Image (cartoon, rainbow, N blue to C red):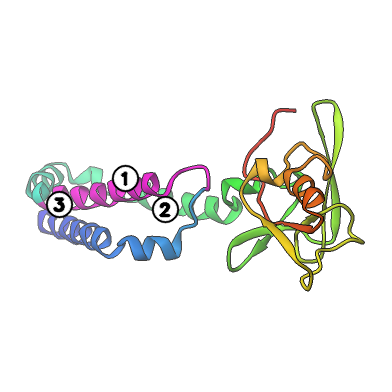
């Protein structure tokens, strides 16, 4: 029994250390979509802390395997309950992951305007060719998008890719969160320049209502 427990701990420890080494920054960038609310360097530090924690936990399991093995050998009746608890915990987490579909923070709520849709390349985009309405500060604000997903005055007035265009990108302020199209920065700049504007900014946060 003692050897079985110690061997299992060694496998777990080595696996955790290997995971910490394998999940380098390139792998993390490919598999995790960060929130736009946090700077990249902060995300990198958090990811590094998790990797170091996994490696340290794995090393600890290997180092204390004999002590845990002796404790298990002294109380073998507790092993079945521990094993059952571990299996039930894994089963519960699997069910939870299948029921709860996590999305990036920028999705807001499922029915929050402007509505989003999944995108295989960049995570999400605004639902195109539609107008959504939101009540902010006691007034109704319309968010209208053309077929390409640009915020426009009306669906019938899409951005013409063949014309000179002022391109705007950014987050809520540039997007015009809580503002009508005419009040937004892209619309006002486009009007002063006498050229069309293309607003590809995103709405990245909640606004007090």
C-alpha gap between disc 2 and disc 1: 14 Å
Position in image of residue 136 (x %, y %): 79, 31
In the depicted view, which residue is nearer to us: 25 or 68? 25
Residue 162 vs 78, above or below: the answer is below
Residue lying at the far right in this picture: please name it.
156
> Which residue carries the number 3 mark?
59
Q: Residue at point 35% right, 50% down?
A: 44
Q: Residue at point 41% right, 61% down?
A: 29
Residue lying at the far top in this picture: please name it.
138
Q: Residue at point 63% right, 40% down?
A: 205
> Which residue carries the number 2 mark?
90
Q: In front: mark 2 or mark 3? A: 3
Q: Residue at point 28% right, 52% down?
A: 51
Find numbered disc 3 in the image and state the secondary structure of the residue it sits on.
helix
Left or right, 135 with respect to 89, comes to right
In the depicted view, which residue is nearer to us: 163 or 200? 163
Q: Which label's residue is closer to the chain start, 1 or 3?
A: 3
Q: In front: mark 1 or mark 3? A: 3
Find numbered disc 1 in the image and state the secondary structure of the residue it sits on.
helix
- Residues shaded magenta: 36-62
Is disc 2 surrounded by few (<14), some (14 to 19) or many (20+) residues within 10 Å?
few
Q: Which label's residue is closer to the chain start, 2 or 3?
A: 3
Verify CB contact (< 8 Å) between mark 1 and mark 3. no
> Which residue carries the number 1 mark?
81
Left or right, 94 with respect to 164, comes to left
Position in image of residue 64 (x %, y %): 10, 46
In the rendered image, which quarter is residue 16 located in? bottom left
């Amino acid at each position: 029994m003692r050897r079985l427990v110690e061997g299992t701990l060694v496998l777990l420890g080595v696996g955790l250390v290997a995971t910490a080494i394998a999940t380098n920054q390139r792998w993390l960038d490919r598999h995790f979509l960060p929130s736009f609310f946090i700077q990249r360097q902060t995300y990198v530090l958090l990811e590094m802390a998790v990797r170091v924690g996994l490696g340290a936990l794995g090393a600890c399991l290997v180092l204390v395997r004999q002590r845990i093995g002796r404790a298990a050998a002294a109380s073998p009746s507790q092993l079945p309950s521990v094993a059952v608890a571990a299996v039930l915990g894994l089963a519960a987490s699997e069910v939870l992951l299948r029921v709860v579909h996590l999305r990036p923070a920028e999705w807001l709520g499922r029915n929050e305007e402007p509505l989003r849709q999944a995108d295989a390349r960049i995570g999400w985009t605004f639902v195109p060719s539609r107008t959504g309405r939101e009540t902010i500060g006691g007034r109704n604000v319309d968010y209208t998008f053309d077929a390409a997903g640009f915020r426009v005055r009306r669906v019938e007035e899409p951005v013409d890719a063949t014309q000179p265009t002022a391109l705007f990108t950014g987050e809520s302020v540039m997007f015009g969160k809580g503002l009508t199209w005419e009040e937004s920065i892209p619309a006002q700049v486009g009007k002063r320049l006498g050229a069309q504007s293309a607003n590809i900014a995103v709405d990245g946060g909640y606004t007090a209502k």
